[in-house]
Image: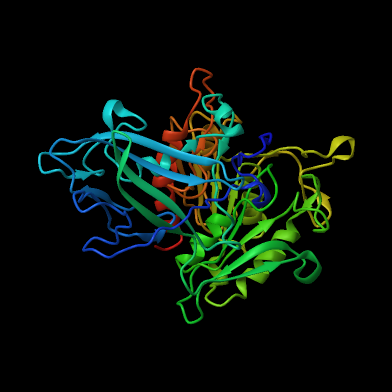
Amino acid sequence: MVRMVPGVARTGKARAVLGALLLALSTACSDGAGSDDARRPDTDRAAIHVDRPSALADERIRVRVSGLGAHDRVTVTAGARDQRGQPWGARGRFTADGDGELDLDDKAPARGRPYAKPDSMGLLKEMLPQRGPGVKMIGSGDAFSYHPPSPAEQRSYQVRLTVTKDGRQLAGRTIERRWLTEKVRHRKLTVARDKVDGEMYTPPAGERRRPPVLVFGGSEGGNSGEYAAALLAARGHPALSLCYFRCGKGSGRPDAINMIELGYFTHAAGVLGREAGADPERMAVMGNSRGSEIAQLLAQRRPSVFRDVIAYAPSARVNGPYLAGASGRAAWADRGRPVPAGPIPLDRVRGTVLAVAGGNDKMWGAADAARTISAQRNARGERHVRAVYPGAGHHVNWFPYGQPGQEGGANSSIVATSEADQAARQDSWAKVLKLLGH
């Protein structure tokens, strides 16, 4: 539902259009707070310290600068490059304390730009295109976002931090943001071989059994849930990012949401449930936007297979087919029969539906849908759960920190909900992990 602009990865787009973070690494040398890879003259003792130079992409880090002059005014920059080599970045001006120290968790950038409150993650969350077609998108209200290569292609990505004063670099540091831990395994699933199209991520053998998670996106099609699936596997959950339409030429999958069979998803769950470390009795399903419809239907109509649901930017109704033209019958099918449009009951769901929504969603009334979902009760008589973030838009899905970009809100005077979206993802990701047993 978001059109493509060359060189800019769009919110929720398939892996083929996701951007890449391609940065040159500098030589690192060790110090008490991690390595400092700046090459500086003997008279310049500035250094960037990071508590976790290599961390999962959904984890916070703390950034501190030492060796500055008392009350020095400096610019701190975070930079990366997308798939086409175009730079993305964010920078803020900061003032060191009387000892020449600067802690980004304690000090906000001057004039609240590009973010208002002290936050070591602020620059990573606020990166925007610096050149290329993406620059024209800034402030437009159109949705776009930055994504690194898929975890299947690259297990981690790098972000470059620099400190400058009067145009002169004082210190530099490269940090690594990991999708996968060292022993997580990946394999590609195909319709020809496995009867499903997707990317499987499996934790190391011998790990205690955890709920497996079936992950998929919405009307963008493709395999947009792969980043979340990889991070879930890094936290011990076997996870399958499933593509159900627009999976590419020769994939064996349709190019429209039209009579998509529930059986396709239940077969995928069967494959996932047999992975090492999976507890199939606690199977969870995670769907975004249009994908939230089928996620709820699966838990309602196949409660023996699926327990819990994470429904991002949800609908509380089954909507009609998409991209099907005159041949469209229904979006979803159950054993060959169209699933009728209308409200989705959730009284047979074995576990909990967690509905995550933004109150400033211009795509549809996700917040109202989340309230409708949470007003219902599951098979045990327990209410489902909502997490609604008033200032956030449609892009509340998945994990925090790794999805900088912009999106307009339902209120046309608000052209960017990115700050609220980031806060929503940070808060809701913790709720997702808790639902899964963390």
Q: Residue furthest left?
A: 98
- The residue sitting at 55% across, 68% down in the picture is 238
Q: Is residue 409 above or below residue 370?
A: above
- In the rendered view, how is the structure colored? rainbow
Quadrant for residue 350, please give it: bottom right
Q: Residue furthest right?
A: 327
Quarter containing the N terminus? top right
- The residue sitting at 34% across, 45% down in the picture is 162
| Left or right of 94, for residue 194 | right
Q: Is residue 110 above or below residue 306?
A: above
Of residues 137 and 180, the one nearer the viewer is 137
Question: In x, y percent, where is residue 359?
Answer: 48, 30
- The residue sitting at 70% across, 59% down in the picture is 265
Report if residue 375 is visible in the image.
no
Q: Is residue 141 above or below residue 244?
A: above
Quadrant for residue 263, please give it: bottom right
| Left or right of 190, for residue 199 | left
| Left or right of 389, for residue 87 | right
| Left or right of 387, for residue 278 | right
Q: Is residue 186 above or below residue 307?
A: below
Question: In x, y percent, where is residue 396?
Answer: 50, 41
Q: Residue furthest bottom?
A: 206
Of residues 18 and 73, the one nearer the viewer is 73
So how many labels did they put on this image? Answer: 0
- The residue sitting at 54% across, 19% down in the picture is 412
Question: In x, y percent, where is residue 136?
Answer: 58, 27
Question: In x, y percent, where is residue 154?
Answer: 56, 61
Report if residue 118 is visible in the image.
yes
Quarter containing the C terminus? bottom left
